[in-house]
Image: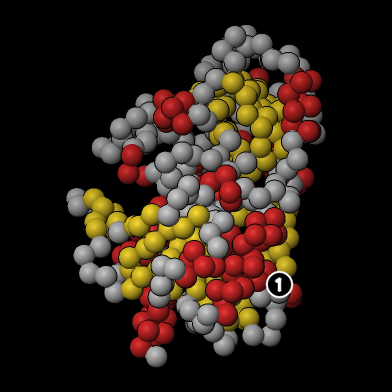
Amino acid sequence: MTESATNTLQNASCSSTPPSSDITAALVLADGTVFWGYGFGKEGNTVGEVCFNTSITGYQEILSDPSYAGQIITFTFPHIGNVGTNAEDMETRHPAARGLVVREEVTSPANFRAESPLGAWAAEMGLVGIAGIDTRKLTRHIRKNGAPNGVIVYNKDGVFDIPALLAQAQDWPGLNGMDLAKDVTCDETYDWRGTRWHLGKGFGTLDKEEAHIVAVDYGAKINILRCLAETGARVTVVPATASFDDIMAHKPDGIFLSNGPGDPAATGEYALPVINKLIETGLPIFGICLGHQLLALAFGGKTYKMHQGHRGANHPVQDLRTGKVEITSMNHGFSVDGDSLPANVKISHVSLFDQTVCGIECTDKPIFSVQQHPEASPGPQDSFYLFEQFMKSIKAHKAA
C-alpha cells in the first residue's frame, strides 16, 4: 500500500466511488458511512454487527471464539497477522465471526509457531477481511454511536454496488433478540480430557479424575474445557438444547454453563427452564459470559444490550470479596442489570471501567458466575483461581 493511498483512505467518507484504482474492499455501515480498503481472506461480502477489540495479541483466538457469531471484528491494534496462525490456537473448529477489519496490510508471519499466514487462514475459514482503513476513526464512530450493522465486501475487480450493500446492512436485524447459541453449539454429546498448553510440552491429558462436570455448550471455547480438565475434572459436553434429564443422566458432580453469542434473553427461552431445574438440584454451578447472563436471568434478574460492549484483553475487574483487581479478557455486548438481582444473589465482581456487573454468586447455593473469560490468560493467570474455586465447591459438595 502506498503512502498516498493510505492518506486517501484516511479521508474517505460516504462516496460510492473508490478513492483510487487499487481499492479491492469496502466496509459499508448502516448509517451510510463507507470505509475503503484492501481485501484479504475470502472474496465476497459478509454482514454483521461491527464491534472493536482492543487486544494487542491473540487475534486467532478472538476470531475463532464462538461468542463472536454474527459480528465483524475491528482490531484497534494496528499490526494484526504478524505471528501468523496455527492449529493449536483455535478455540473452535469453524470460526463463527463474520469478518475482520485491520489497519495495516497483513504481513508475512514471523513466529516459530506459525503454520499459515493470516490471509490464507482467513480464506480457508471463510472470513472476509479488509485492511488499510482508519480503525481509530471507526472505533470512535462505534464509541459515539454504538455498534452498527455493516457489510464488508472484497472484490478483486474493484467494482462495488454501494446502495445494495447499504440496503443489506440496514436490512440485517441485529443481535438484539437474536439467539445464536444454536448455531455454534456442538451437534452431539462428547467427552473432554485435554488439559492446558505448556511451552515445550504442548497440551496434556487428564490422568487422574477427581470429579465429573457436565458442560452445557452455548458456544464454548476449547481452552475453557482445558482449564476445567486441568483442575482434575472429566468433562462431558452437551448441546445447548440438552434437556434437564439429558444432563442429569450423566450423573454430574457439577454443571458448567459456557460462553456463547447473541442475546441471552433469546437463548433463555429454551435454556432457562433447564437451568432453573439444575439450580434446584443443589449441584455446584459455574457460568462464564453467556452462562453468567443466563444464570442471572434464571435467578430473576435482567440483562440489557450495551452501547458498545466490552471486548479486549486489558479490562480491569475487581473482586469485591477480596478487593483484588484482575486484568481480564472480555467479549460481550450484553450485561447483567445489578439492580434486578434478588437478595440471595450478590455481585462479586465489577468492571473498573464502568462498574458493570462482572460476577455474581448465590448466598445459599454453590453457584457463581463471571462475565470475563478467565481461561484467556491476559493477566496472564489472574483469574485461573475461578476454576479452582469451582472444583473446591464440587469437592465440598461431594464430601457433604
Q: Is residue 127 visible?
A: yes
Q: In this view, does 213 lie to the left or right of 270?
A: left
In the picture, measured across the screen, residue 181 lies left or right of residue 250, that is right
What residue would you read off at disc 1?
A: 301
Which quadrant, please, contains the C terminus? bottom left
Residue 296 is situated, as x and y percent measured from the top left of the image, at 64, 71
Q: Reply above or below: 214 against 91.
A: below
Q: Which residue is drawn at 29% across and 74% down?
A: 210
Asked if residue 318 shows in the view, the reply is: no
Q: Where is residue 281 in the image (x, y as percent from the top left)?
A: 53, 80
Q: Residue at x 68, y 85 (%)?
A: 343
Q: Which amino acid does label 1 sit on?
A: Gly
User: Against 113, is 9 above or below?
Assistant: above
**Direction bottom: furthest residue:** 400
x and y percentages locating residue 355 in the rendered image: 66, 69
Q: Which of 40 and 11 is in front in this view?
A: 40
Quarter occupied by residue 292: bottom right
